[in-house]
Amino acid sequence: MNLTGGKISGTVLLTGVTGGLGAELLPRLLRRHPDCEVAALTRGGTPRQAQDRLEAALDFARLGPEERARVSLLHGDVSHPRFGLSDADWRALASRVGRVFHLAASVDFDLPLAESRAANVDSAREVLAFCGEAARGMRDFRLNYVSTAYVSGRRRGRLMEDELYLGQTFCNGYEQSKFEAEQLVRQAAARLPLTIYRPSQIIGESSEGRIRKFFGYYEFLKLAERGRMPVLPADPLARPDLVPADYVCEAMLHFDADPGAVGRCYHLTAGLERSLSFERIFSQMYRELAARRLDGKGPAKPRMFRPEELEWMASPEELRRFHLSPLKLLLRTYRAYLESERDFDCEATQASLARAGIALPDIESALWLSAGYALGARFGQTGRAGAARSGAARQPA
Ligand SMILES: NC(=O)c1ccc[n+]([C@@H]2O[C@H](COP(=O)([O-])OP(=O)(O)OC[C@H]3O[C@@H](n4cnc5c(N)ncnc54)[C@H](OP(=O)(O)O)[C@@H]3O)[C@@H](O)[C@H]2O)c1
């Protein structure tokens, strides 16, 4: 295998292909590198189930027959020792892989810390062990590791790309496990050529709003559509950081091809200036819902309260309905993200991407398309619990 100047002519190991980001990255990766082959590490109770799950992701990615032929199944679990492969298979894989895109993670905010760690820290450890083996025989080996901008936890103020631990605490086990995983990855940067990416909350790609998994923003949209949002529990002026999936993927592929990106960490975020306030996001959400009704009358937009003020500002009827609604549970999961905004520094990264022709799409129009796509797709088959329901979490055979 020869990897020069960002050209990939051998095997790429991709984890997380069945996920929202992975299914968006795969077609872009194949098109950008027409000679590369991709081994897609995929879970499933049996090899057949894993193959079916991979096929569904390839269908979503709208791959043509020639592109599909370049993607092979690697049935395994990234958090298991040697991905659940035999020692011989693991070594054989390492001998032919020149690039790794490690996207797989459990993004369930409600898991206990131990389970998030088992999913996200163990998998980072396994990927690093694999990369150590693969890099020994491969001159231009690179690891692309997807972290999250929320490794900053509860810290506020300007959040920088080169910072990691500054005494912060975390909003949930997901954030903490991703932080611990990024710590491991950063430690490995002394011996491995790697690049870290920190997206904020990912929404659909900006041309059609397509995405394969629906959580975060989409869970509120789903409740709004069903008229199960008696109040809007968010700081109206806070601007959540939402970023379209295509921008994240194009940025990763760009930096993967840039030798100067080795050892760097990038915020793939919109930044406060380009982000919309909750007031605007929810107004747009209810406009979209109304626009889809023949009579133009969707569910009425409820009143918005800062989460900490809800109990004493909402009317008795609003509170009664809130306490009976699924929104109450959702608020437990997302409260920390609704009550204030994060200021992820991304100026230099956005400028460098813009010079390469990768502009951050307009967030309002991407969000509009994302809402339309999710509603049209009936929020797909799988949500955050989808993997467990589909048997993906079981051990590979
Ligand atoms: N979505 C966001 O808003 C967001 C924001 C910031 C960062 N990120 C990061 O972006 C990456 C991709 O997230 P996503 O949005 O695509 O999440 P997602 O839609 O939930 O997909 C997660 C992917 O990881 C796979 N996976 C999880 N555990 C695995 C294991 N033990 N072995 C093999 N595969 C495993 C899942 O496979 P199954 O189908 O088998 O479950 C799925 O393909 C993650 O690292 C996440 O932390 C996401």
Image (cartoon, rainbow, N blue to C red):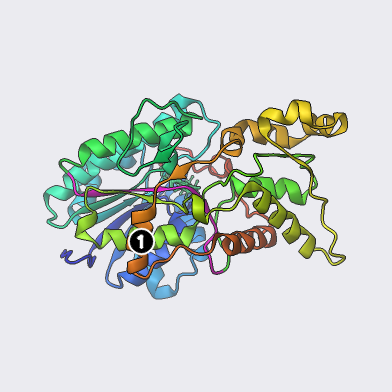
Q: Quadrant of residue 386?
A: top right
User: Looking at the picture, does residue 361 appear above or below residue 272?
Assistant: below
Question: What residue is rendered at 73% in x and 30% in y?
Answer: 310
Q: Measured from the top left, where is residue 287 in percent x and y? A: 75, 59
Q: Measured from the top left, where is residue 302 in percent x and y? A: 79, 44
Question: What residue is rendered at 37% in x and 66% in y?
Answer: 354
Residue type at tag 1: Ala
Residue 344 at least partly seen: yes
Quarter of the image with the N terminus in it: bottom left
Please name the residue that numbered disc 1 is placed on: 351
Residue 72 at least partly seen: no
Q: Could you say whether the residue bearing mark 1 is in a helix, strand or loop?
A: helix
Question: What residue is rendered at 18% in x and 67% in y?
Answer: 5
Q: Measured from the top left, where is residue 89 in percent x and y? A: 24, 47
Quarter of the image with the C terminus in it: top left
**Quick check: 9 left or right of 69?**
left
**Category of crowding for the residue at label 1, using alpha-carbon neighbours closer than 10 angstroms: few (below 14), some (14–19), many (at least 20):** some
In the image, is residue 206 part of the stretch drawn in magenta?
Answer: yes
Read off the magenta span.
192-207
Q: Quadrant of residue 219?
A: top right
